[in-house]
Image (cartoon, helix red, strand yellow):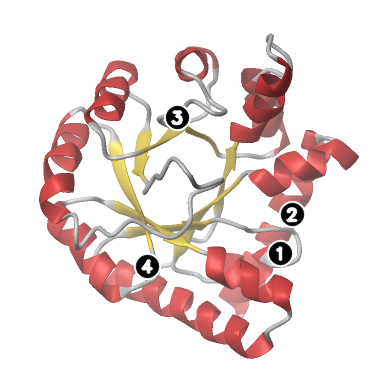
Amino acid sequence: MSAARLRLGVNIDHVATIRNARGGAHPDPVKAARIAAAAGADGITAHLREDRRHITDADIAALSRDIDLPLNLEMAATDEMLEIALRHRPHAACIVPERREERTTEGGLDAAGQHNHLAPLVRMLGGARIRVSLFIEPDVRQLEAAVSLGAPVVELHTGAYAHAVIDGDTERTDMLLARIVAAAEAGQKMGLEVHAGHGLTFDNVGPVAAIPGIAELNIGHFLIGEAIFSGLDSAVRRMRALMDQARQAGLAA
């Protein structure tokens, strides 16, 4: 079954990155979330990292309390993050790989290789009525692991595709896009809700947004960067329009 309307989740992590560069309370991630909501976002995503380099515990508490849109908490598979998720009960929790030395999340979670470690976290999050998502590579083995774990949602890592577009490598871009298309189709057939994200921009979002099997895109760093030049409202509205145009074209094809 195709998702007719593609949802947009706006990641507001790097609003907090800018705030933390000077300290204090400005700019406020909650204010950014409200602007994104008014501009057409369907949800807000925030990654609470172990080192608290951008989003903080106080931000998660404020977002949980003060925004009307569903909150998607990106989290590492640790006892600390599980406890925080169970305390705040966000709409969704996306389990992502996390290494202290990385600047951003690089690559997908090895759900297949970490099955036994992930199983109790997925079970406890689901038991708290938190929708569990796994951030994985577009690979059938990882999709099968998500099904085995009982996670209802997967988010396909689009970073390699995004880098190939930037590099101008058309052959690699086409190959990586085909992997995403195949994974979205396979995930749907397995009964998973399929999302996608990482590295998506105005220039590369169209082909991914056109994939009928994808229900949601999560986009953050690019939108916050564009907000410096055009404002966050404008950036989100333009992304929303590009996604809608591509989805309509994909469904018509």
Going from the N terminus, do you reach mark 2 or mark 4 first? 4
Image-quadrant location for residue 53: top right
> Is the C-beta separation of discs 2 and 1 under 8 Å?
yes
The tag on residue 48 is 3
Q: Which residue position holds label 2?
A: 241
Crowding around mark 1 (Cα neighbors within 10 Å: few <14, some 14 to 19, many 20+) is: some
Q: Secondary structure at mark 2?
A: helix
> Is the C-beta separation of discs 4 and 1 under 8 Å?
no
Say which of marks 3 and 2 sits in front. Answer: 3
Say which of marks 1 and 3 sits in front. Answer: 3
Distance CA(mark 4)–CA(mark 3): 33 Å
Q: Secondary structure at mark 1?
A: helix
Examine the rendering and report whether any part of residue 28 can be seen: yes
Distance CA(mark 2)–CA(mark 4): 23 Å
Q: Which residue position holds label 1?
A: 245
Write the residue at 45% across / 28% down: 51
Q: What is the quadrant of the N terminus in the image?
A: bottom left
The tag on residue 1 is 4
Image-quadrant location for residue 155: bottom left
